[in-house]
Amino acid sequence: MSTVILLVFFFLFIPRLEAETFFAHLIGSEKINPQTTLLKFSNGRVALTDDVLHLETNDPYAVIVDEEQNLLQIQSDDKALPLDSESPHHFHISAPPTPTLISENEAYDIFNRLNSRYKRSSECSNRAHVWAWEEFTKHHMTSEKVYVLFTASYINKHRFKWWFHVAPLFSIKKDNNVEKWVFDFMFNPRPVTIKEWTDGFVFTKRSCLYTEKFSEYDVNPQTEDCYLMVDSMFTWNPIDLKNKELSGQSKSQFSRGEINFAYKQAF
């Protein structure tokens, strides 16, 4: 009888890790230590594994992880959204568009009219893309995108589920200065500074190191918790940042295919 009581107590009161499934392309992997490998996926999610896996970068997978981001299962699957719907004329070599300079009152007006009909399970890159697109096409507001990129060491230490997060960035005229405010309707009740925004995800509250090169984050020595990159509103996700560095070309306009995907997935 005592054994039965102990088993009932175990199953009722010992927390069990919930499993979660997502569909995405494998973007890359890196060794955290000799045993553990970090897998990064196109939707921003990560998985940690001690197994030796033979996976193809850029291929789509169905992934199952537990609450601590340990990989439980992975297999090929075509449910992931395409990685790139671009055609060559969407790219060119030129300076990014100049952000619209707005007042504090305009900033709050913009924030309050951001499309709030998003799905709770949506990806940040899709929400940000739609918000930037709607402000540009409906109100002629040119914004930027700000990316926070989490290092492997930070992800492993805190069992963090994302390797990046992105949101629209607007330029605010305040007194005689220009400030950059982040518009992340899902996580903040108002526009916030970049530091306020990253503090919501970086538990150590350390400042993220700003870089203009994706490779500085991608091959960093893991002494930082996170990196920051700012680019034009036309970028969709960090793949664009990586491709820009490799090719020297920037996106010159929104892609209708990407916008359609973003609406379908996020709203």
Image (cartoon, rainbow, N blue to C red):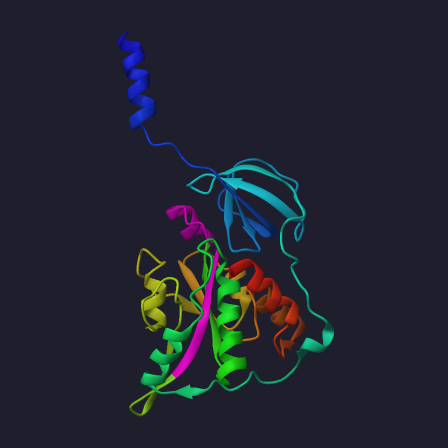
- Residues rendered magenta in the picture: 152-171
Residue 140, placed above or below residue 116: below
Is residue 224 in view from this perspective? no
Question: Does the magenta portion include 169?
Answer: yes
Q: In this view, does 6 lie to the left or right of 31?
A: left
Is residue 199 in view from this perspective? yes
Position in image of residue 143 (x %, y %): 48, 79
Residue at the image position 62 percent from the left and 78 percent from the top: 253
Residue at the image position 42 percent from the left and 61 percent from the top: 226
Question: Does the magenta portion include 109?
Answer: no
Position in image of residue 158 (x %, y %): 37, 48
Residue reaching furthest to the top: 1
Position in image of residue 115 (x %, y %): 45, 69
Quadrant position of the N terminus in the picture? top left
> Count of labels shown?
0
- Quarter residue 178 falls in: bottom left
- Quarter residue 13 falls in: top left
Residue at the image position 47 percent from the left and 57 percent from the top: 119
Q: Nearer the viewer, residue 119 or 230?
A: 119
Residue reaching furthest to the front: 117
Residue 188, placed above or below residue 152: below
Q: Which of 144 and 34 is in front in this view?
A: 144
Q: Which of 220 and 263 is in front in this view?
A: 263
Position in image of residue 112 (x %, y %): 36, 74
Q: Nearer the viewer, residue 138 or 205?
A: 138
Residue at the image position 51 percent from the left and 81 percent from the top: 138
Q: In this view, does 3 lie to the left or right of 250?
A: left
Residue 65, placed above or below residue 153: above
